[in-house]
Image: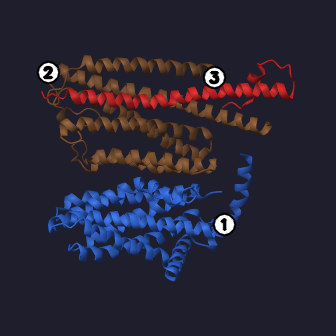
Chain colours: A brown, B red, C blue
Amino acid sequence: MQYSESRTRTLQWLTYASIGLFIISFLMIFFYVGPEQTQGEVQRIFYTHLGAFFGSFLLFIAAFIAGIQYLRTRQEKWDDLGLSAIEIGLGFSLINIVTGSIWARPIWNTWWTWDPRLTTVSIMWLAYAAYMMLRSGIEDPNRRRRFAAVYSILAFSSVFLTIIIIRIRPDTIHPVAAGPTSTSEGIEGDFAMSTRITETLLFTIFTYVVISITVLWHRIRLENRAKQIQSRKMKLLLNA
Amino acid sequence: MPDTLDYMILGYVVAFVLLGITIGSVVWRYRSYAKTEALLDQLEASEQSATSNPSTPPNASSAATNAVPSR
Amino acid sequence: MSATTTTSETTTPAAKPRRLRTPYFQVVASLAWKDLRAEARGRELVNAMLLFSVMAVLIFSFALELDRQAQEATVGGVLWVTIAFAGTLGLGRSLAAEKDKGSLDALLLAPVERSALFYGKMIGNFLFTLAVGFLLVFLLTVLFNVNLFRPVLWLIIVLGCLGFATTGTLVSSMSVHARAREMLLPILLLPVILPIIISATRASTALLTELKTEDWLPWLQLLGMVDFVFLLAGFFLFDFIVEE
């Protein structure tokens, strides 16, 4: 293919690494840490919940930067990055929302509540879903790329809001502001257990970040491949 | 300690299904593109042999692939 | 690359006298004035928006026949939902009309700053949305029996409509180029304006249910901040939407 050998090898290595990390974090979540005292087994969801959040967060930031870069340089690769990041980010963000909702049922006694952070996260998801609608609605490819870049910048306001909402409305019942907080975690007895929770949490977040980068990279290659196929088809049609 | 095992299992099943869909959609499209590419290879090869030189060996299609600008 | 640098070199000397001819604020004002005058003659946009909001409020007051306390708690929500939907109705018309008549292209050919065009269009939309907002103040006071004549609530309405018009102008100038633009506009617009709608609704409701100042002030601050961010975003991003 047209990719350099070393990059392909890096991607391959990343793919294996993310599979390995996923297995290790799975084992850590289910066997390394014990169940949490006040929440019981359901607390284990929490690791994936946060991991998926950080993955989607990273991807949306990437899409925001890609939007700015596309408007500045007009290179198609930035548009590819934006589209790929948002598509994968939507998946991760959905994992984040759904696991949060399932976790909330036994803990908060409700599937859904208009907690500030929950609200902003769902707005974020809707904004990026609308981005996909915008892309499919505009036919001229140049204009589509430009509008998509503009909209990805606009949609980033919801990500920004998600970060700062905690500062504006400190009354959120969300247990985590940024990383693990020991106050509402209600960590079990001895200190050794709490470090286990922290370790598992950090490791799972790291795992999801690596997975999101790997899937993003594959998704970009997929986009390149689609374009290549498109140009080959056009060439064939022109010759015919 | 409350018994919340059911919700934990439900949460992880849903999470892994969604993760599977996210990654699976990429894999699935990779596969379908590979099929399209094979078809294109075939078409390009048959066209080449039909138009320019009937005795062109089948590896002419790889030359056509290289002609696509790399990025 | 070299082509773009040469064109920019040739246009820079010409750009200075042209900026002298039409000052920025004059462009903004005359464009807003043009929209207002066109509206004053035809009145199709504002009439549709006002009529729609009257009907929406009637439906709400019928569907939510509530006791007094519950009415106080819901009236803020009714206010903002109606403003958002009536405003979306107006925005869809406003730029679609410009585009179909070809006047948008003519405006873009004019030697003025693009962002001035944006603010001009935005002010027109802002005033129309504000008209809906103030009509609703009367209407809801009558139909919901809650006194909405409060200066702070008016400030919330002004800020909310400003944010709505800014975002709406930006998004609707994109959606006019889309295939199913009437359908796409609300889908694109609502998630982006939700921060505005939510903070405005929360602030209004907290104010109307006689909560303490510290319960609505953070939402008002958030509203102001979001407005500011979107006003700035419009300045930078409108150029990219209308170029070519």
**CB contact under 8 Å: marks 1 and 2:** no
Residue C162 seen in this snapshot: yes
Label 2 marks a residue whose chain is: A
Of residue A112 and residue C108, the one placed in the foreground of this image is A112
Q: Which numbered disc covers residue A190?
A: 2
Q: Is residue A142 found left or right of A148 in the rendered image? A: right
Q: Which mark is residue C109?
A: 1
**Residue B1 is drawn in which quadrant?**
top left
In the rendered image, the quadrant that contains the N terminus of chain A is top right
Q: Label 3 vs label 1: CA separation?
A: 45 Å
Crowding at mark 2 (Cα within 10 Å: few <14, some 14-19, many 20+): few
Of all chains, the one bearing label 1 is: C
Residue A92 point in image, percent of width and height? 40, 35
Residue lying at 62% horizontally and 70% vertically, measured from the top left = C101
Q: Which residue is mark 3?
A: A4
Q: Tag 1, which secondary structure?
A: helix
